[in-house]
Amino acid sequence: MADGPSAVIESGEDSLIARLFAPIATHPGALGLTDDAALLAVPPGHELVLTKDALVAGVHFFADDPPESIARKAMRVNLSDLAAKGARPLGVMLAFAIPADMSGEALEAFARGIGSDCSLYDAPLLGGDTVRTSGPFTISITAIGAVPAGQMVRRAGAAAGQAIVVTGTIGDGALGLALRLSPDRPGFAGLGADEASVLKDRYLHPRPRLPLIRALREHASAAMDVSDGLVGDLGKLLHVSGVGGDIEITRIPLSPAARHAVDVEPALLEVALTGGDDYEILAVIPQHELGRFNTQATAAGVGVTVIGHTRDGTGLTVHDASGAAVSFARGSFSHF
């Protein structure tokens, strides 16, 4: 082991890669991280699906979050995009910028988190890059997946008269962030320790719905992951599909922790529906496919809920319990 917290960084990029990342880059195509590129064969009869997300300290995670958790979040937000397209992961490319105050121990923990999720989700590390920065810790991952030719699930395939469904529960990640920022808000003050822990964990550790990829390919007409808020993301999907949609607030699945917070402070419902960080799957399913989709989702261990339907026209209407239309100050999180 190196001496002192900064020794890993001071030993140089090649040493850092050899010590921390080459041992987890076991896929033959990674070439032991000794070359300038990786070599990856496309499975016969398949097409590649490529996605990239960047995460920046102070924007997508807190600078003092555990490094292993930061690594897992970076991995999972990218794998969530593959899941929504019905794609099986083939591997990931990792680049990150190391701030001057990041210790060797923190880098080792970050590498452990990457390696753990590479193994958990069968998404091997294939290569990448490391640089120094005078700014915040920044991570960029390119995730590479494969789908049978012609079977990627796009955003733009929805038609009128189809069911709008979501996986899991909505709003936990956004409420977890809000709890971190404003723990004294009325809706959070009465949460039990376990409830608060659930919300914080959902913000830190998304759950990419990879077990659902086959069901999505076989039954969904359109899908995307919910990263920037359910209301805004559904609006994007409907727009590119050229249809309108209606959803009912009372059907949107909330976890017990989120429901408790919203019951105490109803204003938190808007946070839950527009705040982002869900990384659940939003899909549109033809009515005649819905039963088979639900059966496969149940077998895969993923809960799904019908929250509304598509229709002719444009735009999204969100209805409250009385059927009245509800509007929000913003539809989704935006980086700009």
Image (cartoon, grey):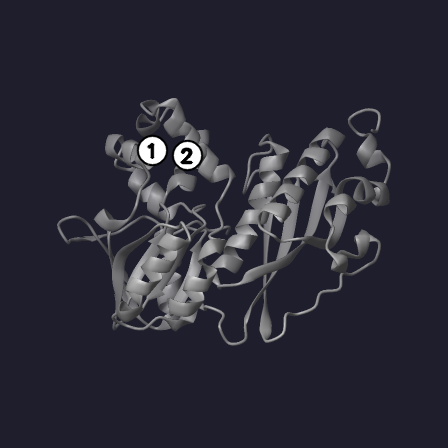
Helix, strand or loop under label 2: helix
List the residue tagged with mark 1.
257
Q: Position of residue 292 (x, y in %)?
A: 32, 64
Q: Residue at x 30, y 61 (%)?
A: 164
Residue 183, x across and y down, in percent: 40, 26
Quarter of the image where the N terminus is located: top right
Q: Is residue 318 left or right of residue 238?
A: left
**Left or right side of 156 for 82:** right
Q: Nearer the viewer, residue 287 or 235?
A: 287
Is there a contact, CB below 8 Å, between mark 2 and mark 1? yes
Mark 1 crowdedness (10 Å alpha carbons): few <14, some 14-19, many ≥20? some
Q: Is residue 218 above or below residue 93?
A: below
Visible residue check, residue 16:
yes
Q: Residue at x 33, y 36 (%)?
A: 258
Q: What secondary structure is marked by label 1?
A: helix
Q: Is residue 314 visible?
A: no
Q: CA distance from mark 2 to mark 1?
A: 7 Å
- Residue 48, by quadrant, is bottom right
> 244 or 201: nearer the eye?
201
Dot 2 alpha-carbon crowd within 10 angstroms: few under 14, some 14 to 19, many 20 or more: many
Mark 2 = which residue? 199
Q: Position of residue 190 (x, y in %)?
A: 31, 23
> Which residue type does callout 1 highlight?
Ala
Find residue 32 and name its label: none
Tag 1 or tag 2, which sits nearer the N-term?
2
- Up the image or down, 261 lies above or below 84; here it is above
Check disc 2 and give the amino acid type. Leu
Rendering coords of residue 101 (x, y %): 72, 31
State the residue lying farthest toward the front: 299
